[in-house]
């Protein structure tokens, strides 16, 4: 079975992330969305909330699983006996960042392959950070995030 792990912070999941998950699920037998538990970083949503929001928008895709992980990604992959990391690339800046991470991960475990998928141009400007910023200043984020989680983001920003 060909399994890929799609890791990230997903604070919150965007339409760009969801597009990569859907496309990845067509290529791999299973895509595991792995949400990083990073206690140092200030997140808008807690780890449980981020996982729940991703589950809500992916529940119709049979071969997608959503989990959280802590520590090194390569260790998570080893525990699960998976050797493929799936990532999305929007810009050359993403490429630089992903190339560095893929190289570090390869150095840590030479069995691991990072597969990068080009973002659909309609989503290449979307990031979780700009979703939060636009929402904080009252802008419309409907084009950036799945409809099912729109209210959660607006409520969280207001709270
Ligand atoms: O959505 P993000 O913040 O770009 O995701 C980054 C993520 C979670 C993929 C990356 O930070 C990660 O893999 N963190 C776990 C720690 C780790 O393994 N670091 C070594 C790779 S540089």
Image (cartoon, grey):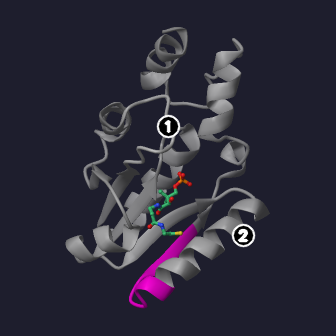
Q: Which mark is residue 96?
A: 2
Left or right, 87 with reference to 56: right
Instruction: Classify 97 as above or below 123.
Output: below
Q: Residue at x 71, y 15 (%)?
A: 137
Q: Residue at x 40, y 75 (%)?
A: 84
Inspect the magenta stretch and tell me whether residue 112 lies in it: yes
Instruction: Classify 145 as above or below 123.
Output: above
Whether label 1 lies within 8 Å of ligand 1 gets the answer yes
Left or right, 7 with reference to 65: right
Magenta highlight range: 107-116
Q: Which mark is residue 11?
A: 1
Cα distance, mark 1 to mark 2?
21 Å
Image quadrant holding the N terminus, namely bottom left
Left or right, 19 with reference to 48: right
Which quadrant of the figure has residue 116?
bottom right
Inspect the magenta stretch and tell me whether residue 145 lies in it: no
For the question of whether residue 140 can be seen, the reply is no
Q: Residue at x 44, y 61 (%)?
A: 24
């Amino acid at each position: 079975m060909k399994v890929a792990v799609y890791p990230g912070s997903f604070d919150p999941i965007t339409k760009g992330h969801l597009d990569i998950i859907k496309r990845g699920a067509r290529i791999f037998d299973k895509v595991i969305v792995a949400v990083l538990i990073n206690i140092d970083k200030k997140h808008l949503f807690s780890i449980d909330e981020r996982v729940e929001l991703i589950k809500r928008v992916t529940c119709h895709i049979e071969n997608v699983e959503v989990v959280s992980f802590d520590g090194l990604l390569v260790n998570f992959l080893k525990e699960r006996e998976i050797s493929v990391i799936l990532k999305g690339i929007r810009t050359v800046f993403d490429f630089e960042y992903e190339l560095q991470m893929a190289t570090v991960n390869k150095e840590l475990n030479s069995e691991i392959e990072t597969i990068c998928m080009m973002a659909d141009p309609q989503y290449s400007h979307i990031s979780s950070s700009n979703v939060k910023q636009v929402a904080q200043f009252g802008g419309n984020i409907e084009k950036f995030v799945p409809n099912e989680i729109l209210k959660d983001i607006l409520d969280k920003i207001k709270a």
